[in-house]
Image (tube, helix red, strand yellow):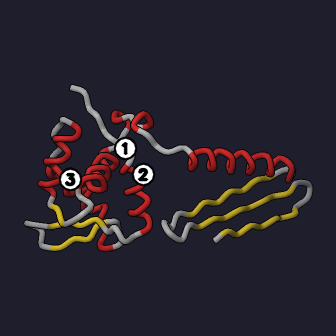
Amino acid sequence: MVFCELVNKMPGKKLKIEYEDPETDDKVVIVIEGSLKSARKILDSIISQQNEAEERPESVNDVDIESMTTKDKLTYIIVSTLKNGWFTSQDVSDFYKDTFKTEISMSTISTYLNRLWQKGSGILDRSGNRTGYKYRLRTELKKVQKLIKKYESIEIQVEH
């Protein structure tokens, strides 16, 4: 939902735009003070950059492994290799080591899996108990489908 409000206050004008993405619940608020002509230039620039980013497919060259966060790496593993069934933290650890050629602690994996589960509101389903949780990617969610599209064209290559 987009909400736009023009507030006329002397001597300047203020334009406030609110956008909430119903698929991801992301909320963006932009407030521009000054002339509407300047505001239009700024908005046109934002829209142009966004359109260019959406038109350009992400490729291997766009991925700098060193700049990927631990969460990004774990999400990549889950979305690219574990999306079709139930998996454990050990499965994630094995694929992480094979993909990134480095170890990651089980407690780190468990922490991130719990965050991605988010008490049932995240991108993962969970079953079992503390000694043996199993997870499943919730592929029916639109935000997960976007992640799958994003990561399916990326191939991680680590040189050691």
Which residue in the structure is indicated by mark 1? 154
48 is higher (above) or lower (below) than 7: above
Residue at the right extreme, as displayed: 11
Which residue in the structure is indicated by mark 2? 150
Q: Position of residue 113 (x, y in %)?
A: 25, 59
Nearer the viewer's eye, disc 3 or disc 2? Answer: 2
The answer to which quarter of the image holds residue 20 is bottom right
Which residue in the structure is indicated by mark 3? 109
Which residue corresponds to the image point at 74% horizontal and 61% vertical from the top-left?
A: 16
Which residue corresponds to the image point at 74% horizontal and 67% vertical from the top-left?
A: 4
Q: Secondary structure at mark 1?
A: loop
Q: Are marks 1 and 2 in contact (CB under 8 Å)?
A: yes
Q: Position of residue 98 (x, y in %)?
A: 17, 41
Q: CA distance from mark 1 to mark 2?
A: 7 Å
Identify which amino acid the numbered label 1 is placed on: Ile
Residue at the top extreme, as displayed: 160
Q: CA distance from mark 3 to mark 1?
A: 22 Å
Identify which amino acid the numbered label 2 is placed on: Lys
**Looking at the image, which is closer to me, 21 or 108?**
21
Q: Position of residue 72 (x, y in %)?
A: 34, 48
Q: Secondary structure at mark 2?
A: helix
51 relative position to 156: left or right: right
98 relative position to 6: left or right: left
The mark found on residue 104 in the picture is none
Q: Secondary structure at mark 3?
A: helix
Which residue corresponds to the image point at 34% horizontal and 67% vertical from the top-left?
A: 139
**Quadrant placement of the C terminus:** top left
